[in-house]
Image: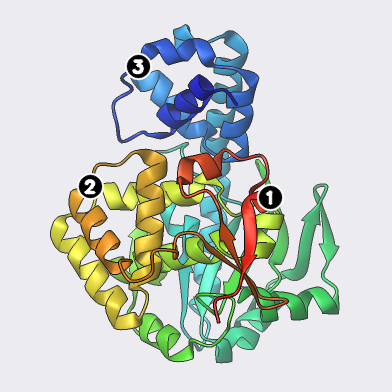
Amino acid sequence: MKEKEKQLFKALCKFKSRFSDPTLLEFATPAVLGHLFFNRMQGVAYDVLKKNGFLGRVNREFRNSLGAAYDQNCQKNESFQKCIGMLSELLATAHCKAAMLKGAYLCTHYPNGYRTSNDADLLVHPKDVTAIGNLLSSAGFRQGNLRNGEFVPATRQEIIESKMLRGETVPYIKEVKLPFLRFFEVDINFSLDYKNGNEDLLSDMLSNTCIRTENGQLIPTLDDADFFIHLCAHLYKEATTLPWIEMHRDMTLYKYCDIYLLLSEMTEAQLQKVFARATELGLEKVCAYAILETMGLFDMNTPLAYGISSTVLDNDPCFLLRVVSPKDKKVLMYQTADVTERFFMDSRIDDLREVDEK
């Protein structure tokens, strides 16, 4: 992408800021459109254009593609909320704690049409993974993946590798045949990283679960600080673990947009509470990582967040650049420090170099 195209892409994603440079609209190219769809930001982009009165300033194909996607997001969210309601009722019968994460709660926190999802993420204690899996299986879910729009059962190797290397199960999937949502997926997360060794931390987080009412549904989730911390931890895990980079799923912008949304609405007292809690959990560096990377991508001006995060990473200046390969226990380092430059790379793998940190 050319520089002006990159600037337009970013401007269309920053829904909390004023669109200040209409001259960028002449660069509404297929490349920008493709990036918006790949990063699941098409609904946001459409509404940013609409709110600023710029729909008539971009070419018809660009405008109509975003408009159709926005409408589809709105309809898909209705289907998704039905599935969340079904899952909430199912979890109410469980004899262990499970917290809904990410899109399961955030889809209703965004303006309608901005964020949608195909799946619900659950956080459970490792000892309860089997119980929750059995509960889902009893309701018609099967473990597998969607390939070319069809369900493919998981192999034993895939089930084992997902647990060992990703801290989560292979998705549990059910065919629901709803508008724009044929399949509903549930991902069971039982670790905040790929190491599967933080059971006490998970117990602490799950002890603070609460029930939120969204659209008349009761959603079991984490309290505000822990929800944000988990969001940061999940982003960090996927952004800095080599298999996610190889799948080109490490820096999909909608994940950073979740941090952008919540951080932009956070008071200074709430931010300080987040870092106090993160320090208590040993996750202050992870939060600093997610916040600084998000601020760079969305050009956020939040001095307190920047100050705290920078201070946290003072003793580990390479933390923002470090990547791990769990399979062969290698450590790699990005050569490019600028997060926006890394984001727009065709292949971030090529920017990595193996290092010896022993």
Q: Secondary structure at mark 2?
A: loop
Image marks 1 and 2: residues in contact by CB distance under 8 Å: no
Residue at screen point 53% across, 14% down: 27
The amino acid type found where label 1 is placed reads Asp
Q: Which image quadrant for residue 172?
A: bottom right
Q: In this picture, is 29 found above or below 189?
A: above
Q: Secondary structure at mark 1?
A: helix
In this rendering, the answer to whether 335 lies above or below 355 is above
Residue at the far left in the pictured view: 269
As measured in the structure, the alpha-carbon distance from the residue carrying label 1 to the one carrying label 2 is 32 Å
How far apart are the two marked residues, 1 and 3, measured between alpha carbons?
A: 33 Å
Q: Which amino acid lies under the numbered mark 2 shown in the image of this protein?
A: Thr
Is residue 110 visible to the viewer in this orientation of the structure? Answer: no
The residue at 40%/82% (across/down) is: 206
**Mark 3 crowdedness (10 Å alpha carbons): few <14, some 14-19, many ≥20:** few
Nearer to us of marks 1 and 3 is 1
Percent of width and height locating residue 225? 29, 68
Q: Which residue is mark 1?
A: 350
The residue pinned by badge 2 equals 302
Quick check: can you spot residue 153?
A: yes
Q: Residue type at mark 3?
A: Asp
Quarter of the image containing the C terminus?
bottom right
Question: According to the image, label 3 marks what residue?
Answer: 21
Q: Nearer the viewer, mark 1 or mark 2?
A: 1
Q: Nearer the viewer, residue 219 or 165?
A: 165
The percent coordinates of residue 32 (x first, y second) are: 58, 25
Q: Is residue 356 above or below residue 215?
A: below
Residue at 36% over, 33% down: 15
The crowd level at tag 2 (other Cα within 10 Å; few <14, some 14-19, many 20+) is few
